[in-house]
Amino acid sequence: ELENTIKATGELVIEVRDAAGQIKEVKKAKNLVVSVGKTFIASRVVGTASAIMSHMAIGISTQTPAAADTALISEAGRVALASGTNSANAITYTATFPAGTGTGAITEAAIFNASSGGTMLCRTVFPVVTKQAGDTIAITWKVTVS
């Protein structure tokens, strides 16, 4: 019997820089591609009209990601993606949260296809990353379909 299982997984790197541009902290985290994200991926294969993933959001909840999630639990800021590139079976998204955006004890992140609301592709939680008012956070997020 022939069996083929397709999985979508992700990993991100979070880099915090102070107002002078010095790296304060770097963290790596794995994410959950949520059910609506998997449906989004499948719909794009057959060309269903739907906005592409265009934004990244950060938040302050530590609630464990669940397949049924459709939004961050406590969103603190959202920005447009700086880039989204495809190579082989992986998509890499990058975004930077500038000074004054998403300030606080950041513990969750997600990718969306809208500047508010929208379809969420994936969500993650991670140990606290403190973003002070003058800090920036740059996130590089790789989603692999294997």
Image (cartoon, rainbow, N blue to C red):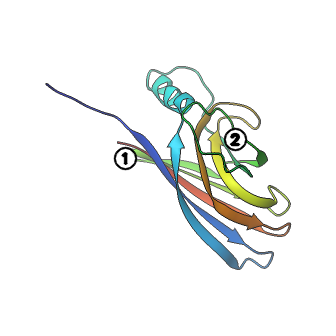
Image quadrant assignment for residue 105: bottom right
Q: Is residue 97 visible?
A: no
The secondary element bearing badge 1 is classed as loop
Q: Earlier in the sequence, mark 2 or mark 1?
A: 2
Q: Is residue 117 visible?
A: yes
Q: Nearer the viewer, residue 69 or 25?
A: 69
Please identify the residue farthest to the left as the structure is shown: 1
Q: Nearer the viewer, residue 138 or 132?
A: 132
Q: Is residue 9 above or below residue 13?
A: above
Q: Is residue 28 above or below residue 110?
A: below
Give the image location of residue 131, x and y in percent: 77, 65
Tell me the quarter of the image containing the N terminus. Answer: top left
Q: Is residue 87 above or below residue 6?
A: below
Report how far apart the C-alphas of labels 2 and 1 lie in the structure: 29 Å
Q: Residues within 10 Å of mark 1 (few under 14, many from 20)?
A: few
Q: Residues within 10 Å of mark 2 (few under 14, many from 20)?
A: many
**The label number, if any, that marks residue 125 in the structure image:** none
What is the three-letter code of the residue carrying label 1?
Answer: Ala
Q: Nearer the viewer, residue 144 or 87?
A: 144
Identify the residue shown where x is 76% and y is 44%: 74
Q: Is residue 21 above or below residue 39?
A: below
Give the image location of residue 95, x and y in percent: 66, 54
Identify the residue shown where x is 69% and y is 69%: 16
Tell me the quarter of the image containing the C terminus. Answer: top left
Identify the residue shown where x is 21% and y is 29%: 3
Please identify the residue farthest to the front as the structure is shown: 63
Give the image location of residue 21, x and y in percent: 73, 77
Asked whether, in this view, residue 20 is left or right of residue 146, the answer is right
* Disc 2 target residue: 72
* Disc 1 target residue: 88
Give the image location of residue 66, x and y in percent: 56, 37
